[in-house]
Amino acid sequence: MTESSIRIAGLTVTYGGVKAVDDFSLSVPTGAIFGLLGPNGAGKSSTIRCISTVQTPQAGTITVAGVDTQQHPNEVRRSLGVVPQGLALYDNLSVLKNLQLFGGLYGLGGKLLNDRIGWGLALAQLEDHADKRVSALSGGMQRRLNIAASLLHDPKILVFDEPTAGVDPQSRNHILETIRTLHQEGRTVIYTTHYMEEVEALCDRVAIMDAGKLILADTLAQVLTQTKPRSFRFTADAPMDTEVVRNALREAGVSVVDIESESHTLEQVFLDLTGRGLRDAS
Amino acid sequence: MSRFFWVVRKDLAVFFADKSGAVMVIVVPLLLGVMMGLIFHTGDGTSTMDVGVVNEDGGPTIVALIQRLDAEQSLKVQVLERTVARDKVAAGKLGVVLVFGANVGKQLTATAMFGGAETGAKRNNVVPMWVDPSRAIEANIVKGLLTKAMMETMFSQVSDPKQLGQMFTDLLATTAGLGDSQPELKRFIAQGVAFATESQLAAEKSSATGTDAKPGDGFSLAPPLDVVREEIVAAGPTAGFNSHAHTFAGMLMQFLLFMAISSAKGLFAERGVGTLDRLRMTATSPASILLGAAGAVAVICLLSTAVIFGVGALFFGVEFRSGILAFGLVSVAQAVFIGSFMLLMAGLANSDKQLDGVGTMLVLALCFVSGAWVPAFMLPDFIAAAGPAVPTRWILDGFAGATWRGLGLGHALQSAGGLLAFSVVFSAIGLKRFRWA
Ligand SMILES: Nc1ncnc2c1ncn2[C@@H]1O[C@H](COP(=O)(O)OP(=O)(O)O)[C@@H](O)[C@H]1O
Ligand SMILES: [Mg+2]
């Protein structure tokens, strides 16, 4: 992981004089699954649009697999799979027509195109909906198609811009699993989100940006060990009273601020109760 | 290149995914064309106008005069009561009414040409013409045709030997008081009387031998110059103007220009949704994306053109008198031009609003100055002079040449060449000016 798949240096993007990205530098090692965290308006999408060559920065350079985005944009485009934040699909065309179009535009044809479309349909679990218009799909299905459409040319570097925005938990889970699999197959991944727990669950490296500036960048493990933990979670082998725990800790000299007895997040409970199968029947 | 075709395919698929939109492209210009064609259609290329007539004279001369007016190709006479006629003009239902008062028929004699038998205040030779002020042109036409009909009526009288005799007899009576002061005039009248008597005898003789002698047979007095109408069309003497060929081309062109505006909006919508960026992320060049969109517009144009002129040929007598190749050339050139117009609009406008405002204005202006609504000869001189600088004029000229005028392949090549030159310029501006973000 010595070589960098993406190297950003001094990136600055302004809109009408207002800096959306401000002297931003970052390096994404090959093979990483890299989480770019930041609140809304932090400049994540602007950065990604520059990486994907569709936006020209006011200053700075970006190389993708060693190729400069501004000097050789077409070469960069072929090695990148960028999943845009918005659903950039043709609403009144079928799933299949959309995949054919983007596959064709990526230069695929004949059997290879058909194979890749089959792969994409499987990836998005849309095999049974190939002939449906995109507008007839559920939000989650559209999100999954949005991903598949960017990966037909089998790129080695994948960039996801908030791919789980506005999807149901089943689809979100499916999307995260998909990305994990794509990474395990040897691809470098940049994953943008403002959901901390997604980065924590998925990524091995993390950068946090705010107001266009880089706040911190490191391995997830490093970031998480930067402070000694104050908060613990354990599971007893049998149900017990909260008082038993509190008393035991007091005897050990720990001053307990609060104690939480809930074992599941709402989402986990929800998924346990509703099952992890995808809910697409619309 | 293959990316260009993928974009064309995509845009066509998007277009035809909206079934009602697709139907519009064919049905609307067809309906407009048929409608306009019916409005302006007259078998021989002229339109008829209604003219009202009030006949308070009632005599045979005025009745004959009215019949002559009605026989004019461009007039249709309605005989009306005075009050009814006046109301109709006032209400704008009739442009022109001729009022023949009592006894005006008596004035319509050959003798009247010489100043008339009756002179002075007694003479009643005024024919009021009531005119709707907004239809002054019609009034002029009617006045001209009335003069023509009056002359014909009088000449027909003169060519009847009996009436000719009567005319000279009248003249003799009027000139009796002159004494010997005008010997040449008297000699002329005497010769006239002899001539009239002779031809009257000749006419009686021929009717006795059973020949159906009409007044004027054997000899006749006729207008000295006779105007014979002849329609000149390159395709040959039998070919005529086909109003459908003209209106179909005009309405189609107007519709396609509007379609180009809505396609430009489609590009803006794609820019907003992000699909344009996604197309660019696939390493498809900006030129391929924009030209592909223009290509789809061109294909749709060709389709509309084929359907509309096909219907025109099958049901409305539109002919491709320069051959299908010439027609095809003009059609393709028009299609390419409309595609480039879409790019120009997408490049120059910043928003849907600008497209709606400026684009609509521009389309209407282009249609107007090209003669799609009113014939080009009726346009002000400065617009007519701008002719070749107006691309839409090349379209209508091209289609006129390829259909009813039958100007041949050379003319079609000229029109196509002109349009393609415009297309290159428009596309270049569009490609250069289009904003991707
Ligand atoms: N096209 C644009 N025009 C003007 N301002 C923009 C545009 N795109 C983004 N911005 C502004 O730039 C800042 C960063 O936006 P963005 O890169 O989308 O952030 P993020 O993806 O982290 O939410 C925001 O303040 C946003 O309002
Ligand atoms: Mg964003």
Image (spheres, rainbow, N blue to C red):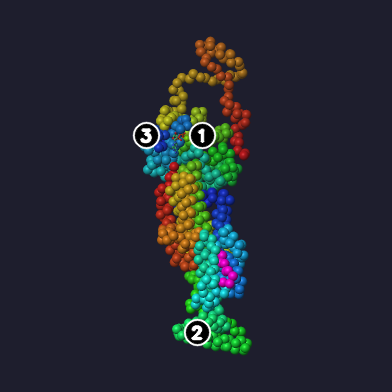
Q: In this view, does A239 lie above or below A120?
A: above
> Quick check: marks 1 and 2 in contact, CB under 8 Å?
no
Q: Where, by quadrant of the figure, is residue B208 drawn?
A: bottom right
Image position, residue A75 (x, y; %): 41, 44
Image position, residue B160 (x, y; %): 56, 81
Residue occupied by mark 2? B189
Distance of label 3 from label 2 (alpha carbons):
115 Å
Instruction: State which chain disc 1 sits on.
Output: A
Image position, residue A26 (x, y; %): 40, 33
Whether labels 3 and 2 share one chain: no
- Looking at the rendered structure, the secondary structure element under dot 3 is strand
Which residues fall within the magenta stretch?
B96-104
In front of the other: A163 or B177: B177
Q: Which amino acid does label 2 sit on?
A: Ile
Please tell me whether residue B48 belongs to the stretch shown in magenta: no
- Looking at the rendered structure, the secondary structure element under dot 2 is helix
| Residue A200 numbered tag | none
Distance of label 1 from label 3 (alpha carbons):
30 Å
Residue occupied by mark 1? A180
Q: Where, by quadrant of the figure, is residue A233 drawn?
A: top right
Dot 1 or dot 3, earlier in sequence: 3
In front of the other: B293 or A100: B293
Q: Point out the frontmost of discs 1 and 3.
A: 3
Residue occupied by mark 3? A10
Instruction: State which chain disc 2 sits on.
Output: B
Whether labels 1 and 2 share one chain: no
Q: Which amino acid does label 1 sit on?
A: Arg
